[in-house]
Every structure is written in C-alpha cells, then in structure tokens.
Image (cartoon, rainbow, N blue to C red):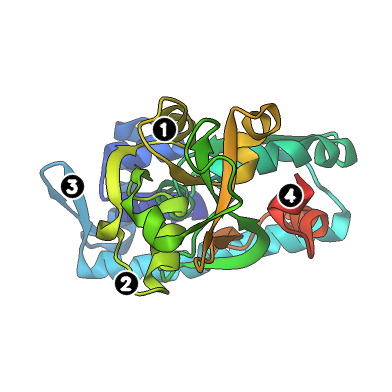
C-alpha cells in the first residue's frame, strides 16, 4: 500500500467508476484497476463492487476510504507546511469561477499575481455555481469563486466581494429613462431567466423569497444558459433580466442598455471563495486566495469596476 494507490482508490469511490477515476488521475483504466487489485490483495478483501459501469465501495472499502481521506489530508498538510517553510510558491493552479467571477473578476487580477510569482501558471474554468462546486469536490479544481452559497457538507466558503445586480432593459424600453421600477410592474414584464444551477438565479430566488414571492410569479419569456445569451436576449427584446452591471458595462456606457433598481427588492449578492473543507490547500492555492482577499477587502464588485 502506498499513498498514490490510496489517492486512486479515493477517486474510484468518489466518482463511482474506474474510467472516470482514470480520467481524473490521468491514467488508463487497466492501470487504475491494477492499483485497486493490489490494494485488495494487500488487505485480503474486496474493496469495490463492480456493478455494471458503476464501482461501489464495499463495507471494507468504506472503512478504508475514511482512513484514506485522513492520510491524504495529512500528507497534503505536510507538503504545505514544508513548502511554506521553504518559501516555495510555484506550479499550476486550477481555479473555477461562476460566470461573473470567472469571466470578469478573476482575469483582472491574475496578471499582478503572476508578476509576484513568475513561476506560477493559473488556469480558469468557467461554469455555473453547481458545476464549480462539483469540480472542487472531484478535485478537478483547487478552489473557486462563485455567486451563491453552497449547501454541500464538504464545502467551505468565505465571503469575498459584494455585487449589486440590476434590472437591465433595452435603451428604447418604456422604463429606460427611469432609475427605479416598482416590484408589481416588474413581475408583469416578460423576463429572461437563467438556467438552474446559476448563482444569479439562486440569488434572485432568495431576494424574491424575502418578499414572499415565488419565482413562478415572474412572467418568464425564456430560460437561457449563460449571461452572454441573456444579454443578447435583452438586446433582441425577448424580455428584461437581472444581470450584474459588470457584465454589461460596455453596453451601459454606450447607452444601448439601461440599468434600474427594483423598489423594495434587495438585489445585493456576494461572491464567495469556495474550497474543499477536508483538503489542505497547496501553498500556491493559499497564496492566491489570500491575494484575492487582499485585493477585494471591503469593496463592492460594482464600485470597483
């Protein structure tokens, strides 16, 4: 038994499959199967039941998994402590971002960070909030920045930045010259909804719920899968929508779109540093998270950009 085999076993259990685990650890499926077989030989029992395309941990496997998590976490903590002691900040960092943080916030601050640490490469994966959280849990990402609170027991979050969403309408819309619209008028207007899993959608649901309003009360004209498609839908006059002003900054400056507040509806939401509760961050991940907190301490997203 070695730590690498335990990491492979951990992936097989978490992803419930040999092929998915093989993709996650960049090995072939036969190699993953061989490592699991070696572990089973070492312990003298079956650790995984092969049920069609699924791989499910046996009772012995579940016991080993609990210890594997602790051992891997302790090994990561050891690596981090030693690297910090030696002052080593280098390598590749995989960060996830929901649409607004991933497209607008993170790209603006990476440059200065890589100037501080020239041996660092940062890659950003953009998806909805739920996808980013899944990728963190599956160890595809070191951490993420998302626009909604998670309800996963193995996820921790720290508030990073506030964002005040706005109602966005075309420049020739009947409300274009207003600064505010009342809530009842808003509920009667054709509305473009973001897809399930979107942080924007979750924040809107929360804001409406605080006023005792269900999402179904909206006059939904379309449901679209990205901020950019929502913006195009507004321009094409499918309906109005709730969008972060940073996503339409160019259009607002050019006057092709207008932004309003909705009287009595609080559209403020937060962006959260989001990371695995049981995984010790690498020195690089820890340094970048601290850098983000330093950059955005006490500021709102809209006031900064």
Local crowd size for mark 2, using a 10 Å CA cut-off: few (<14), some (14–19), many (≥20): few
- Res. 95 in view: no
Density class for disc 1 (Cα within 10 Å; few <14, some 14-19, many ≥20) is few
Q: Which residue of the protein is positioned furthest toward the left in this rendering?
A: 52
Q: Which residue is mark 2?
A: 63
| Residue beneath the point at 55% across and 31% down | 171
Q: Which mark is residue 284?
A: 4
Q: Is residue 76 left or right of residue 131?
A: right
Describe the element under mark 3 as helix, strand or loop: strand
Q: Secondary structure at mark 4?
A: helix
Q: Position of residue 189 (x, y in %)?
A: 35, 47
Q: Which residue is mark 3?
A: 54
Q: Residues within 10 Å of mark 4 (few under 14, many from 20)?
A: many
Q: Say if 50 sits above or below 293 in the image.
A: above
Between marks 4 and 1, how big is the CA–CA gap?
25 Å
Distance CA(mark 4)–CA(mark 3): 34 Å
Say whether disc 4 or disc 3 marks the residue closer to the N-terminus: 3
């Amino acid at each position: 038994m070695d730590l690498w085999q335990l990491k492979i076993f951990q992936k097989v259990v978490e992803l419930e499959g040999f092929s998915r685990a093989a993709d996650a650890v960049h090995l072939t499926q036969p190699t993953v199967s061989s490592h699991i077989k070696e572990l089973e030989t070492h312990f003298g029992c079956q650790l995984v039941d092969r049920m069609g395309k699924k791989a499910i941990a046996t009772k012995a496997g579940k016991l080993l998994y609990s210890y594997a998590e602790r051992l891997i976490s302790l090994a990561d903590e050891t690596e981090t402590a030693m690297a910090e002691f030696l002052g080593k900040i280098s390598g590749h960092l995989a960060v996830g971002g929901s649409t607004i943080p991933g497209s607008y916030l993170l790209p603006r601050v990476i440059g200065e960070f890589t100037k501080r640490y020239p041996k660092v490469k940062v890659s950003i994966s953009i998806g909805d909030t739920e996808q980013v959280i899944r990728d963190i849990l599956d160890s595809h990402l070191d951490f993420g920045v998302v626009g909604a609170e998670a309800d996963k027991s193995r996820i921790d979050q720290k508030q990073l930045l506030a964002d005040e969403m706005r109602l966005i309408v075309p420049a020739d819309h009947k409300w274009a010259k207003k600064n505010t619209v009342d809530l009842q008028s808003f509920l009667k207007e054709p509305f473009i909804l973001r897809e399930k899993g979107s942080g924007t959608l979750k924040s809107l649901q929360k804001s409406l719920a605080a006023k005792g309003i269900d999402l179904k009360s909206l006059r939904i004209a379309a449901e679209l899968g990205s901020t950019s498609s929502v913006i195009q839908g507004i321009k094409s006059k499918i309906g109005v929508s709730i969008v972060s002003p940073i996503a339409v900054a160019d259009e607002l400056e050019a006057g092709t779109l207008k932004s309003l507040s909705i009287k009595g509806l609080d559209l403020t939401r937060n962006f959260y540093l989001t990371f695995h509760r049981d995984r010790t961050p690498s020195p690089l991940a820890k340094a970048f998270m601290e850098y983000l907190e330093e950059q955005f301490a006490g500021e709102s997203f809209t006031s900064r950009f």
